[in-house]
Image: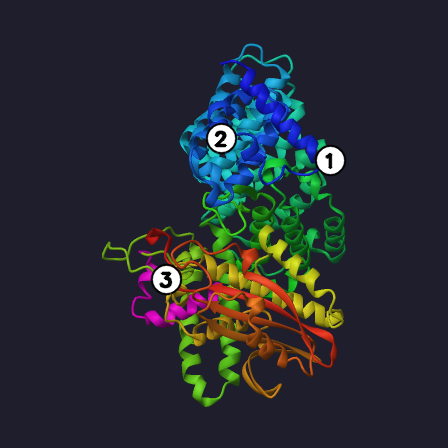
Amino acid sequence: MSNEPSTSLTEGMAALLTASPGRPPNDDALSALGGWERLATDGAALADSPVLAQFVGLVVREAAHPGNRAGTYADALRAITAAVTATENPAIFADSLETLLSSPAALEVVGTTLAKSLEGIVEAFQRLEDQNARAARRAADALEALTRLNLTGIGSSFGFLALLERFNTPMPKPLGTAVIRAVGTAVDHWPHAASLAKVVRLVAGLDPPAGEVRSDADPEDVASDAAWALAGIELVGALRASDLSTMAKNLEASAAYLEIARDAYEREDADVLLTVVEVLRGLLQESGVPPSVDALAMPLLEPEALGRLAERVRRINIASIGLNHWYGDPKRAALLAWNQLANDLNRLRVEFARNSFYKAEIVVDGLLQIYMGSRSVAVVRREEDADGLLTLIQPIIESGFARTAGLLSNLEDHTNALERQVAESADDRRSALSEQLEAARTVLAAAKTHALGGAGQGKDDGGMGSTPLPPPLNQLLPAGSAAATALGAMSKQVLIELGQALDDITIGKRSLNLIESSVYSTIRAALASSPDYSGAAAAAVDEVLRLIIRFVTTRTNAQSDLYAYVFDPKANEDSIHLDLYNYLASSDLGSIVEFEVQHVGGGRIDLRLKFDGFAIHIEMKVDSTKVPMDDKTAYLKQAVAYQGTDIRIGFLVALRHKAFDPSGPPPHLSALIGHTEFGIEGDSIPRHIVTVQVPGSRTKPSDMR
């Protein structure tokens, strides 16, 4: 093909960019360049064009609007993708590829082809005799992009893992780093990939190479990343371990790699994480079998040592963790988790007075949050959401002692809370609460026996698996285990209610992930103009906001067997009202949440959280219109009416049956939680309302057409 069409397209784009310097091309830019038809014909010849990245950006912008996807749209996307994967200039290739990966619409058309081409680029580099630095940089970017695509199910995961396994010698730094990070991420998300740890050791020169070593490949260039990745592989193995002895072995191996990262490469993040791992190792060594902790006198838990740890956490250079570029930006979530763990460690001595190893959940579950927060990867969604945003993929730890420890601790907390409620309740509620308490005690005793015994799933005496318990109780007592079988006579409804309460407690204790943190920061910034958003009131609003963000996340993600009302078109206000009440009652704010309080603002408020000196009010609604929440004047008037003699900040929470397409996926979290100011005549200071939408009348993904 002649270069003339390519030159013409390049010059045309250059002219458009010159006409609007520093700004994106005008809305009619694609049409001016010849439309989809021109790109379909000549787009593949744009490889290595200096304006290829701008072409990809234009295509992605146009593809974001469904109405623009017509004619030879798909052929144009394929042509532009071919140009990207044929580009040999590393900088142009990386910029163009990153933009392409940001488009769910484009990947729906070219994702599979792109994954195959990227795999071919990496394989071609492995076969090259002259593996120059430019080719290594290009292969590194291709491997990182291929990793992100595989995490969302685009391309063959088995082919991807096999590709990684073929790296058996040290590589030039950019590609060596990419291989190590890809392996670490693969192990996070595919437990069966743990054997790839040998690839990290080979690329880092820790084991004798299986092939010829290149003269420009210095293993020391990637040694710091390798030590961190290997520590992470062993740590995730510990978190997934089903028994304590396996956990102890993995923790010991993780600690050894962290010591190398700390001592040889001066990684402060490794030093902090090593402290936490050593605390866990100490608990395991002291506890014996079955685990029991009578006293914790280890130096790492002395007040002075904990103070030093907290100070290191405050000043840790999160950037040194190495989570950049394709890893996304989970550093805020990781920092939140580190700070929370430092606070939790200060409570260890008190908590361990309960003399049960599973209270190590304070460390184990905190460590789990840190790992999941710091190892999360930003990848493009396969399905488009309201904003076309990236999603966050976290490590998969579906089972293991880390999960069990946290659930056991939360179940004990719930049992203790029920005991207090029974003692303080009126006669008309005592019977129902007593039934819940008895169920909680029974399940707790069975779960302790099962978890601390290290038993597998097992079968009952008849050899048949028992009926599964409702989630998340089924994580504590798998179907078929002797402990689960013993619960067969219990009321199914009581077990469902117990599972929901346990799920709410677990949710409330979790740190916010990256997307939730972004929503949290946005709303807090909007509230900053309120004079009431300061001191104790601001801290209280922040805590309620955090809990409600997690509430919306979990109800949006939940399957129909856990929160059926979000899938029920006939669900009324009582459904979400009781659900949010029970959720808040299970949190740390449970003792101050009140249900349907009379004589507030001349009416009855649905939920009130009564703090010392002020209260936060939550108005609940069920809505079957498409009107945006900030245009719901009647709802807003009612919500702000309850602020007449209290702080001028409140919440309006609605179950929306028709606001969103019930046959498709729900909107992104950022579109569900908003903020609005509401002026009152005669009052110079506006009221602030956090608007919260829970999508209702949902359709199961498997039923979407």
Relative height, residue 192 to residue 592 (above, below)? above
Return the disc, 3 or 1, that comes first in the chain's sequence: 1
- As shown in the figure, which amino acid type bears the numbered disc 3? Asp
Q: Are marks 1 and 2 in contact (CB under 8 Å)?
A: no
Mark 2 closeness class: few <14, some 14–19, many ≥20 residues within 10 Å: many
- As shown in the figure, which amino acid type bears the numbered disc 1? Glu
Tell me if I can see residue 289 in this picture. Answer: no
Q: Is residue 591 left or right of residue 299?
A: left
- Residue 645, by quadrant, is bottom right
- Look at the numbered disc 1 and give the secondary structure of its residue: loop
**Which numbered circle lies on residue 266?**
1
Q: Residue at x 61, y 26 (%)?
A: 12
Q: Which residue is mark 3?
A: 561
Relative height, residue 545 to residue 33 (above, below)? below
**Is residue 582 on the magenta stretch?**
no
Return the disc, 1 or 2, that comes first in the chain's sequence: 2
Q: Residue at x 42, y 28 (%)?
A: 159
Relative height, residue 62 to residue 570 (above, below)? above
Name the dominant secondary structure of the magenta segment.
helix
